[in-house]
Image (cartoon, coloured by chain):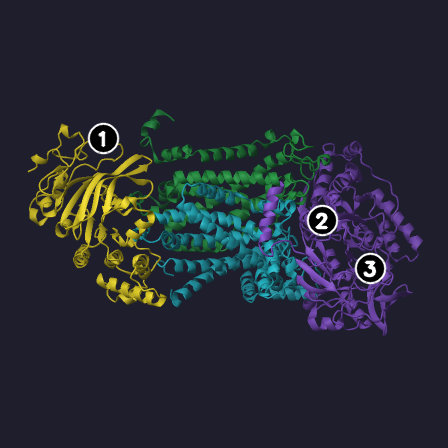
Chain colours: A green, B purple, C yellow, D cyan
Amino acid sequence: MTEATLASAPPADSLFRRNLRDFRSNRLAMASVIVVLIFVIMAVAAPLIAPQDPNETDLFRRLQPPAWIEGGEWAFVLGCDGLGRDIFSRIIYGARISIFIGVAVIVLATGVGILAGLAAGYFRGWVDVVIGRIVDILLGFPYLIFAIGLMAMMGPGLFNIVLALAYKEWVIPCRVVRGETLAVRELEYVEAARALGAGSRHIMWREILPNILSPVIVVSTIRMANVIILEASLSFLGLGVQPPTASWGSMVSDGRAFILEAWWVSTFPGVAILLLVLAINVASQGLRDAFDPRFSE
Amino acid sequence: MNALPRLLLATALATCPGIFPAAVLAEDLIIGFTLDADTLDPANHRKRETETIIRNIYDGLLTRDANMLVVPEIAESMTQVSATEYDFKIRSGIKFHDGTMLTAEDVKFTLDRITVEGAMGGQTSPRQGLMGPVASVEVTAADTVRITLKEPWPILPAMLPNQQIVSKAYVEKVGNEGLATMENGTGPFKLVEWRKGDAVILERFDDYYGGATDIAPVGKACVDRVIFKIIPESASRVAALLAGEVQIINELPAFSMAQVAANDGTQVMTVNGTRSFFIAMNMEGEAFDDIKVRQAAAMSIDKDLIIDKILAGTASPIDGILSPDAFGASELPKAGYDLEKAKALLVEAGFPDGIDVTMDTEGAFKDTAEAVASMLTKAGIRTTVVVGEGAQLSDKWRTKGAPKSGDMYFTSWGNGSLDPFDIFTPTHRTNDRGNSAGYANPALDALLDAAAVELDVEKRRAMYREAELMINADQPYVYLWVPQDIYGVSKRVTGWQPSADSRINLHDACLN
Amino acid sequence: MTLLLEVTNLCTEFNTRAGLVRAVDGVSLRVSRGECLGVVGESGSGKSVTFASVMGLVRSPGRITHGMIFFDGRELRDMSPDEMRATRGRDIAMTMQDALTALNPALTVGEQLSEVLIAHDETLPAGRAARRVAIRDKCVEMLGLVGIPSPQSRLAQYPHEFSGGMRQRIMIAIALACRPKLLIADEPTTALDVTIQAQVLELISDIRARLGMAVVLITHDLGVVAEHCDRVMVMYAGQVVEEGPTEQVITQPRHPYTRGLLASIPRPAMRGQPLTPINGQVPDLVGLPPQCRFQSRCPMARPECLVEVPMFDAGPDRRARCLRLEDMP
Amino acid sequence: MSFGKLLERIIQLIPVLLGVSLIVFVMLALTPGDPVQIMVGEQSITPEQEAELRRDLGLDKPMVERFFIFLGNAAQFDFGQSYYHGRPVSAVIAERLPATIELSLVALIVALVTAIPLGVLAAIRKNSVLDRLATVGSLLGVSLPGFWFGILLIMLFSVHLQILPVSGRIGYASEVPTVSGFLLIDTLLAGDVRAFGEALRYLILPAITLGLPMTAILMRVTRTSMLEVMRQDYITFAEAKGLPRRRVLFRHALKNALIPTVSVAAIEMGSLLGGNMIVETVFGWPGLGRLVVESIFLRNYPLVQAAVLLYAVTYVLLNFIADILYTVLNPRVKL
């Protein structure tokens, strides 16, 4: 930051910075952020980190136990699956799928949700009625069932999962944005901007949006955890990405056959899901406490 | 697990009234079974699991013994009158479960219902194809039924055990829909309750005529009740067997065999199956139209390794379409695992950098298909497994001559009759319904057509040998193996043997 | 008149994130039977916390650190929680500022009224049916007493179905249901329209006279005090700064803060004079040095005011916390 | 709540139900492939039959008209024939429904009876060990993938300890005549305590797995709203009235704190319904969820379509009931 911008910045302790400081001082939340970051790094740098090729089968290592159990070896820390593939490497590659889908769905849904929510809250009238109806209807579907229905009809595949989840997911940011917009649009500074002759687009993007972003971001992070579980659930049911691509949900599912002989096959991918989702949940709770204290406890 | 928490938990659960273990009635034989029946209508299904359940309720004209030998069941005897005419003398004194007597009319009604177009309320039985060229069924005497064929079809007797006899009066009373959930068979067990998706509960039919006289013992069933308990998850099925909740499980995974064998009260029983596994290579495609590429594929797959490691030795490798147990099967030249030669062949075929292909398969075979794919990949045939669903893949690959897309298809073809006609013709005759490779060889077609109607057994055997040699040379498919059916069985069960046609016939099973 | 409530040197502290706040700092007071004491002060002066302490309703993170609270001859602080419960509502009752928030929105008025009787009234008959009838009669009687028309039909209604004044009356009826010896009315009129304010105060005075109970009227409105209270106590920043008979305190305040308060409200007696607000703000109670708390805003403040100031006697039955007591006009 | 208002609310349901049906209709209509082939799947039908089916489905008619035909049929629970089962789709669904409803209800009850008391306890003992445990537990609960948790439970209780059955719903209870289809009720009607216990044994693990996320969320909501309510003036006033602690907590505080709990419970019913698919698959529970999953792989689309519609309509109606319950709990809100 240059000195000039420093000088023109609002009082050093802006709300955002104070919130950020609150968040940073929350140790548990920070630890969770680190866990999430580790997963992200794992996903991005998978080829560098993974000790083995995730799809390399070796039938001589079929159901090889984790390293610390007799018969295991450290090159295959968490053991091998039914085709002798390294579970640890597959978990690392699986993080790509989970995180990609989580991010893609949330970005897509939040984008659509913001547009629809802003339009509904700002213009009100028939726009609001139409969007509201669509939202009501989509809310009429239990989430997983809606996604399962869509996946059944569209067929499996990475892109289809993103679509199947985003079709319903946007409703959530949309409702948040609409509510916040309704509250904000009557506030003084918006009135002032309108009085000064600012156009609708300017008011929506420049005046309203920046002021409602916090709750949207908070909601989005919480939702991301949910989306990751949903993706894993779809993959578990065999409606997710196609093999041999490693996906945590399908790894758990594949391991089900071996629970009597090789507990590690489905246990470890499940632990990965739990860790990532838990970390996102804790971090987002910290975010909410810091940035949107209305909803915190 | 340490003993103390286990004890505490057990005590905690035991103290709640009625919560602790179900003492199963002594004479209940419970089968841990993969899939529920879709329907109980013997004419309206094409699923092995459904058939297994139905066969314990209904009997057929003919049946097979544990060694796959066809023997009379409801028929007392069978006479071949001419190349296209068969007479069946119906056993007397057979009662349906409702107490009415079975007549020749019932047999005719049953067979008509299967073979006549639209005979099931406008719908045609999905089992029609299993009856081949049946032209008509007539009652020629009070106790005799004649089946007339459009053309000679020597395997009619082998196919008849697939069809179960229903009561004409009953079907007319309850309708086709009624027959889907209710039964009135002549089999050793009658239906008590069908808890859909959960269990089929059967009890002994005390007026049973005794079943096929050629299969001892003749008489009513041994156990009081039989329960098919549906447990789709293989691990759950094994766990239920080990816990003593069930006495027989089907589709015991190969990797669980050791555990079941090691367990005190249980044993593993296997029987040679009749289903041949193979990989179809799309001969209309760019790469696999070249025999060198097809040979390269065949040589890059180490069948023995997969059989050893994944199937725990419970399969027989094949080099032609026929199971070693099938009629006409013979020793054939082996492609043999040879990675270097496979690579060389690929280079010779003009693919020095290898090829990228996909391999379609169903979820159930994902494991082995992926193992195969990784072997192909090592040879330069870089293979991605695409899991699809049965009917969809069937549409895609079994196009009956229409153009098809796709590179490879990991699939199988059942051959319950163990007669080559039932597997060789559909998978290899030009444009036939199971010819997923798109193989077209007029010489083979002629040979198969002739073999189908050849009545001289030895000539016929030689013809199939010749056909096997032809396809072994042309390699439209990579022929893989015929797996065994593996069952986990409680040592309390006696008198039961697994049957090669994958059906669980419980007439003779007893429980100690 | 005999003494009903005597509080001596009460201190109540709140352990907040910002630090330790002594919200009530050495408050002493007395209320005789049948008497009406007015307690005045700005918000945050500790007047509500003082009486919450008396009622035993100070919640975590607050706690009473020392002091004695004698009520009707018993030390309330020595009572067990159950004894305290039995005393609350029966002997000491309280009304709150806003009946809208003080009445439970999810329960009917009848239930909220009858539950006090069930909890405390030992004169109720034993039989179930008779008991129910007795409770109902009493509820009707109480609603009638506070001037709710056709009380029978309104027992089954919810608080939101009443007007603001009516709700206030209902709250008073609940507080008075067991004929307490002391009623603590915390800002009973703040939330109300002016016309209704008068009615409600009238009602309290009226009932007080009829039942012979003592009333503590917490308010920031000196006018209300002047009209209804026998004695008045002024609080500032957790301390009592002045107390005495109402008439005397109003006509002749002995503390600059009381004077400031009086000057900031319109009164008939001061007609024609300009209203003068008190400048400045109530000091932050965290880490307050031991000195006169009003000095930062006091027009009469001098350097010597920067010491801890005790209460001084300022005439018969009057006391004030000011070093310049004598300089007051 | 007057009858008129209730009627008004019911009328408001109509556009939502219509929209839900439209989406379900479009889902199948847009599935690539010939609808008749899709419906029939692997089974064979005669050309006449196929023509009749085309006529029934109105495939020759414009989309809009087809939608209304679909609606009309759906209103009569006519979803066509499930060719795999040789019976109408509605009959096949009806057979599986009691098992699913029983499991869902038990899971709901498990969730409510653990979440609410725990939430209340955590709130009134804020920052206690119990509160912290509850907070951690609820975080874990919402983060645990149900399919994995179910497998862990099976590994522990069924495989390792062998104290609970592995899969299914049947056991000794098979002796009991079917009246309601709910084994817990039927066994009691038959006076068979032992069969009841048996049915319960099969229910425990699936119900816990299914109810866990809901328990976690409801506990958190109850705790938060209880804390919020405990700060309210009416609680202070209730204390000032000298009411017994229990009455203050359960009558005054809990009744208000339950208002958000009910709303959230209604929304979470969605995860309960969706969770059925997972839990029934893991535990081999013979309900609708497993049937739907199996049908997807058989491409038995008419059944999938009908089931999705059924789940959605159930969910809408459950939310409607929750709305009504909400007004009962919260007299301030008028329908």
Left or right of B508 in this view: B405: left
Q: CA distance from mark 1 to mark 2?
A: 92 Å
Left or right of A164 in this view: C189: left
Q: Label 3: which residue?
A: B159
Secondary structure beneath label 2: loop
Q: CA distance from mark 3 to mark 2?
A: 31 Å
Label 1 crowding class (10 Å Cα cut-off): few <14, some 14-19, many 20+?
few
* Image location of residue C219, percent across then percent down: 19, 48
Pointer 1 with pointer 2, Cβ within 8 A: no
From the image, state whether disc 1 or disc 2 is nearer to you.
1
Q: Report the front residue among B484 and C165.
A: C165
Establish whether labels 3 and 2 are both on one chain.
yes
Q: Label 2: which residue?
A: B404
Secondary structure beneath label 3: helix
Question: Farthest front residue?
Answer: C73
Chain at numbered mark 2: B
Q: Quadrant of the N terminus of chain D?
A: bottom left
* Image location of residue B247, percent across then percent down: 73, 53
Q: CA distance from mark 1 to mark 3?
A: 105 Å
Q: Report the front residue among B251 and C12.
A: C12
Q: Which mark is residue C289?
A: 1
Quick check: can you spot residue D292? yes
Pointer 1 with pointer 3, Cβ within 8 A: no
Q: Quadrant of the C terminus of chain D?
A: bottom left
Q: Specify the amino acid type for callout 2.
A: Lys
* Image location of residue C10, percent across then percent down: 24, 40
**Figure check: B208 above or below C1:** below
Quarter occupied by residue B475: top right
Q: Report the front residue among C200 and D122.
A: D122
Q: Specify the amino acid type for callout 1.
A: Pro
Q: Which mark is residue A231?
A: none
